Image (cartoon, rainbow, N blue to C red):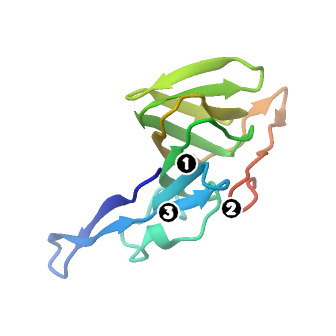
Amino acid sequence: MAKGARRIVTGHDENGKAVVVIDDIVEPEVVRDRAAYFTKIWTTNVSPADNNDPFDGGKREVGLTCPGGTVLRFVDIGPGTRTAMHRTDSLDYGIVLNGAIELELDDGNTVRVEAGDTVVQRGTIHAWVNDGSDWVRMVFFMIDAEPAIVDGKPLPAMGSTYGQPQGK
C-alpha cells in the first residue's frame, strides 16, 4: 500500500535568502480501485518553469500530464496490477525506487525494470505490469512534448484512465 511522501519546497525571503516555504506530507490519491496510487509532488504550467510563481504546484489540477508544463509524482502499483495501454504527449523519466515491474510495449515485448533502473518514455504505447507479490514504487517526471511522428503523421495520446483527456 502507498504511503505519503514528504516534499520540501524552497524559495526566497524578502532579502533574497533561500528559505523553506513548504515542508509537508503529500497523501496519495487512489487510482483504479486501490490497485495503484498517485502522489503528486509538484507541477508547472509552463516550461521552462517560472521560479517566481508563488503558486503551490502540488495543488494544481492536472490530468496524467500538464499540457505546456511538467508533473512530478510517485506512482505505487499493487501486486497483480496491469495498467491500461496508454500513450501521452510527454517525455517521461520513470525511475523504479523499490520492487520490480514489467514495461510492456504495444508489440507485446516486455522489459523487466528493477529498483534503480530508469525508463525514458518517448511517446510510445505502453503498460506497466506488476506480476510480483509486493508493491512497486516509481517516481515519474513528465514533461509536455510534441507527439511522436511516424510516416509524417503525429501519433495521438490515448488510453489515459486518469484525470483529464490527454493531447493537444
Give the image location of residue 135, x and y in percent: 48, 40
Q: Position of residue 151 (x, y in %)?
A: 85, 26
Q: Mark 1 points at which residue?
A: 143
Return the residue found at the far bottom: 14
Q: Quadrant of residue 104?
A: top right
Q: Is mark 3 on a helix, strand or loop?
A: strand
Kindly check if marks 1 and 2 are in contact, taking CB atoms under 8 A apart as contact. no
Tell me the number on the disc at residue 44. Answer: 3
Residue that mark 2 sits on: 163
- Could you tell me how far apart the alpha carbons at marks 3 and 1 are, in whole angstroms? 9 Å
Q: What element carries label 1?
A: strand
Mark 3 is on which residue type? Answer: Thr
Q: In x, y percent, where is residue 132?
A: 54, 28
Q: Is 36 on the left or on the right of 127, as rendered? A: left
Can residue 25 be spotted in the picture? yes
* Residue at screen point 44% across, 31% down: 99
Classed neighbour count for the residue bearing mark 2: other residues with Cα under 10 Å, few (<14), some (14–19), many (≥20)? few
Quarter of the image containing the C terminus? bottom right
Q: Distance between the residues labelled 1 and 2?
A: 16 Å
Question: For the residues carrying marks 1 and 2, which lies nearer the camera in this image?
Answer: 2
- Quarter where residue 27 is shown: bottom left
Identify which amino acid the numbered label 2 is placed on.
Answer: Gly
Is 17 on the left or on the right of 67, as rendered?
Answer: left
Q: What residue type is labelled 1?
A: Ile
Q: In this view, does 1 lie above or below 85?
A: below
Closer to us: 20 or 110: 110
Q: Residue 43 carries which label?
A: none
